[in-house]
Amino acid sequence: MSFGISMNASEKEKIKAEFNDFIKGLNSITIIDYKTYSELYDFCMPLFDKMYEIGRKSIEKDRNS
């Protein structure tokens, strides 16, 4: 589990927090700079949301078939 995320958080939020912890760790040990961290965060978080919605719609479609 990611640091600082509630055990009651949604699975989507837990995944997003895990990714954030990873890239924040890369920034903290200077593998990536803050600008790169920010760009990765800004680019990837909406992708996680899109992936979640695609998966949710796919499950609903399968249930209705």
Image: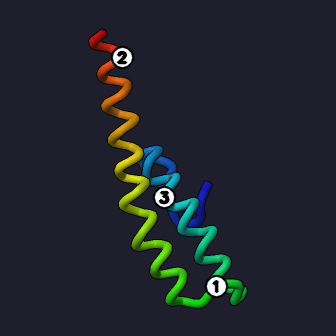
The quadrant in which residue 24 appears is bottom right
**Residue occupied by mark 3:** 16
The residues tagged by marks 2 and 3 sit, at their Cα atoms, a distance apart of: 25 Å
| Left or right, 57 with reference to 36 | left
**Image spot of residue 55 (x, y percent):** 40, 35
Please give the name of the residue rendered at 36% of the width and 52% of the height, measured from the top-left corner: 49
Q: Secondary structure at mark 1?
A: loop
| Left or right, 59 with reference to 18 | left
Q: Is residue 33 above or below residue 58?
A: below
Within 10 angstroms of label 3, few (less than 14), some, or many (20 or more) residues? many
The residues tagged by marks 2 and 1 sit, at their Cα atoms, a distance apart of: 41 Å
Residue farthest to the top? Answer: 65
Please give the name of the residue rendered at 36% of the width and 38% of the height, measured from the top-left corner: 54
**Image spot of residue 27 (x, y percent):** 63, 84
Q: Which mark is residue 62?
A: 2
| Left or right, 22 with reference to 61 | right
Within 10 angstroms of label 2, few (less than 14), some, or many (20 or more) residues? few
Three-letter amino acid code of the residue under disc 2 = Asp
- Give the tally of numbered discs: 3
For the residue pair 52 and 1, the one nearer the viewer reads as 52
Q: Earlier in the sequence, mark 2 or mark 1?
A: 1
**Image spot of residue 58 (x, y percent):** 36, 28
Three-letter amino acid code of the residue under disc 1 = Ile
Three-letter amino acid code of the residue under disc 3 = Lys
**Residue occupied by mark 1:** 32
The nearer-to-camera label among 2 and 3 is: 2
Please give the name of the residue rendered at 56% of the width and 62% of the height, measured from the top-left corner: 19
Q: Colour scheme in the image?
A: rainbow
